[in-house]
Image (cartoon, rainbow, N blue to C red):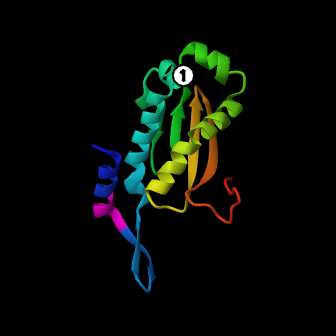
Amino acid sequence: MHVSAVLNNYYAKTMRKSGYTPEGYLWQLEYRDTVRLLQEKLLLFIRLNEKLRNNIGNPVRFVNNSVEAIEFNFVEFSEGYRLKFIEPDFDKYCMRLMELLEPVLTGFVKEIGYGAHGFSFRFRYGSEVLEKHKSIWGISHGGEDQRA
């Protein structure tokens, strides 16, 4: 099913009133109803990125999106990839992955009609767990880059 068809299905079932203007009500999707759409976008990104695709054993176990957070399980990376990129600086790799995913998240925020959304990330590597937060803007605010 095409992404726009999936989104149209969401619009039909999960809209809520977010305000009122003289022209009528403003409608917005409930974020919880878009979680599966973002999961599919993240999995598609992995399939299209050769380096990730070739080094992740099971993409479904690697990334799991929920209402609470986007979770990554770095154990799913190949041993060589972990030794080369993750073990030297776990925190730095997490930040780089967040930057890599930013266009996907920005497109998603725009597609669901949000002006912005704050995402929580949870990165797991063995017993290590790192949590990060990032605001993604779907619209520009005065020409300034306001991503946190």
Q: Position of residue 141 (x, y in %)?
A: 65, 64
Please, what is the dominant secondary structure of the magenta stretch?
A: helix
* Residue at point 42%, 35% (across, down): 44
Quadrant containing the N terminus is top left
Q: Which residue is mark 1?
A: 51
Amino acid type, label 1: Lys
Q: Position of residue 126 (x, y in %)?
A: 58, 25
Which picture quadrant has residue 61?
A: top left
In the rendered image, the vertical position of residue 80 relative to residue 6, given as above or below: above
In the rendered image, the vertical position of residue 106 relative to residue 74, given as above or below: below
Residue 74 in magenta stretch: no
Residue 14 in magenta stretch: yes
| Viewer can see residue 64 | yes
- Give the magenta part as a residue range: 10-15
Residue 73 lies left or right of residue 22; in this view the side is: right
Q: Position of residue 50 (x, y in %)?
A: 50, 23
Q: Position of residue 77 (x, y in %)?
A: 53, 21
* Residue at point 45%, 83% (across, down): 21
Which picture quadrant has residue 57?
A: top left
